[in-house]
Image (spheres, rainbow, N blue to C red):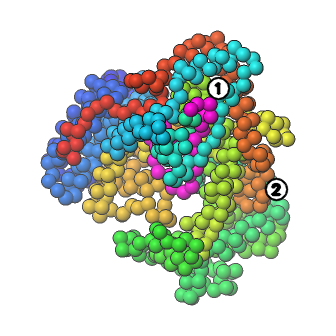
Amino acid sequence: MIVSKRQLSNSCWQTVQLKKISPSSIEHLQNFITNISRLQKTFTDEELLEEIEFLRRTAVGNNPISQGKGRLRLDALICTVSDLSKVGWQFRYKDSLAYQRIHPDNIEADELSDSQKRSVSRAARYNNLLKPSTQKRVAKLESARYFGRKQVSIFSLMRDGHDLALQLKKMTADPHFDIKEVIDPYIQVVERGALCEYTGLDLNEIFWYFRQTWAIPDGSTPGRTLQLLIRDRTTEHHSIIGIGALTSAAANFGIRDQFIGWDSKGMQAYIETKPTMRYCRWINNALNQMIDSVYKTDFIADKVLSAKLVQHPTPELIDRLKAIEVHERKLHDQNRKRTKSKLKGADLESDALWIYETRSPLFRAKRAGLLAQLFACRLALNDFGLHKNSRKALIDALKSSKGRQAIQTVILKSKERTVGTAIAEISVCGAIQPYSTILGGKLVSLMMVSPEAIKTYKQKYSGHISIIDSSSAGKVVRKAADLAFLSTSSLYGRPNQYTRLSLPLSEIGGKSNRRLKYQYLGKTKGTGTLQFSGATMDAFRRFNIESGGRQVTGQFGEGASEKLRLIRACLENLGFNPEDLLGHGVPRSCYGIKLIDNTRNYLLGIDKTPHYFIPRKNFRESSRKIVSWWASRWLQKRLTRSDSKKLYEQLETHNLVMPICHGARVTLPKSNLEQGDLFS
């Protein structure tokens, strides 16, 4: 973006005193920031990204500090300034470093315009596509190869827009024309090592390629992941209509949890209106099950615990467990380089493996901390006599702040036990061109909540061994995979492919007059790590290790989001307030969809069986009915609108004639930055 003086006046400069930086580093950083400011006033869009990236590489290559912490500190600062300058921040350096986000006229300081939101996602995507590894994978998939007697490539899986437009015109002209003769979608699961039977390409590579066309780059997701391709039987190579992925949901997501009604405060308020014996028994049973599920043999051997103390804990026991948690965490931090998990390549069915894992300092600390919390709940609730399953005791507990806190903790811990198994995030969902032009995104969104997709998820993960729970229990713990709720988000607000999207249950075999509906939940806060590139993360890792900061790893049990923890640690070490710079300003519109009738009670473990809206038998027939509903509700109306001529013209722009100009093709950065690489 080109910045005007008026735009700059709408923001406030924030200053930071950088830590441990030499005079020569300050001078180098000042020159870098001055040049960045000139670029922001001269270039826009991808040209600006290219110029800033070249300047970053040059500045890192010409670092005046030859080696050591000072060099790595300056590299980390240069990369931070570079990344944030790409997404609408401005820097200056006089007596100290100052920064502000650039805001256009008439935009509040905590908001971003649509163009700025796109600049953030554009910069993130540019940084990803700039990687040599990414460019090599794209080139390899686009290269022609022989499969059987025919030449194929990733282009073989793209549908020609001119052909699709021609077939759709025939369909609209013939009232008896069947949609399956033009578009016949089906779901294909992406499995490791599986190949496409029509092109010989690896299904993982196919999914990866089309994922690169998304506005937000892909990243590794911990936990469960089910990737799906939506394909079209009507074309020779069964073209890709769209892609989708179900991944493990975030443990705590406020607007989602409030919508479900199982957030700790909301659920507690609900119990207060109905303090029945059922909830009294549930609180006791949930607390007993959670305590029983934690490995305690070593604590009993060390005479920290006894059978009597488990049932009747004391304040002294809780304090001792908290001290053990602190001590074991220190041991883990001191010995993390020497302590290695044995999980990789091991027999996960062996209880001996999990006993070894749970006795490690990390999980010994986690178990001590968890038991301290659970015993504090038991101690508080025992004081009210709740362990005797008394309704009066529940009412008395709810009147006390101590009792309410204990009940909220039980609710929170119950939620943590099922959030990763019964809730999933639709992390990828959309159509590729030319299908996206004819509302293919809505089709993919409906297919992602189909009985076929839900059953496929269950087949893959039913009985799956939980790493975290097994490490806490000291034995094999298997988790269920009955999805009860799905959540997702859209980058650019409303309207979008989820707007007004619902599915009458009667259309797909359900008996009720109700609908499966994507319901709007609200917006996220627009914070995260989207604005930090891979090059910056590499610089942060080197700087964090050399500067003696706490080592951040992706080891199970250490905490969520290794990337976020590393960024926080490094920004603090450099002198920044991480909360200032983690706000990328791109809030997402969030949606949720309930798959069962007893969502809250099943998720909390109050009900043992999910009551699905749609029968899970004959799931492929349900998918076909979903396609028919989409065609009649959305596609047909789109084709008969007054501007349908313009739609057909848009479809025809996606052609597979050389040189290929197709919206499903990954567009790599045009710049040539190899000269900058010589400095790195």
Residue 124 seen in the figure: no
Q: Residue 292 at x, y = what percent?
A: 67, 75
Q: Is residue 393 left or right of residue 498?
A: right
Q: Compared to 153, does 42 lie above or below? A: above
Counting from the top left corner in percent of width and height, residue 655 is at 47, 22
Residue type, mark 2 in image: Lys
Residues 161 and 64: in front is 161
Residue in the picture at 64% in, 66% down:
478
Q: Is 102 situated above or below 293?
A: above
In the rendered image, which residue does mark 1 sit on?
Answer: 182
Residue 80 as seen in the image, left or right of residue 568: left
Left or right position of 532 against 175: left
Residue 183 location, quadrant? top right
Q: Nearer the viewer, residue 82 or 455?
A: 455
Asked if one can make out residue 596 in the rendered structure from this viewpoint, the answer is yes
Per the rendered image, the range of residues in magenta is 207-236
Q: Which residue position holds label 2?
A: 274
Looking at the image, is 19 positioned above or below residue 346? Answer: above
Rendered image quadrant of residue 530? top left
The image quarter containing residue 399 is bottom right
Is residue 211 in the magenta section? Answer: yes
Q: Which quadrant of the rendered structure holds the N terminus?
A: top left
Identified by mark 1, the residue type is Val
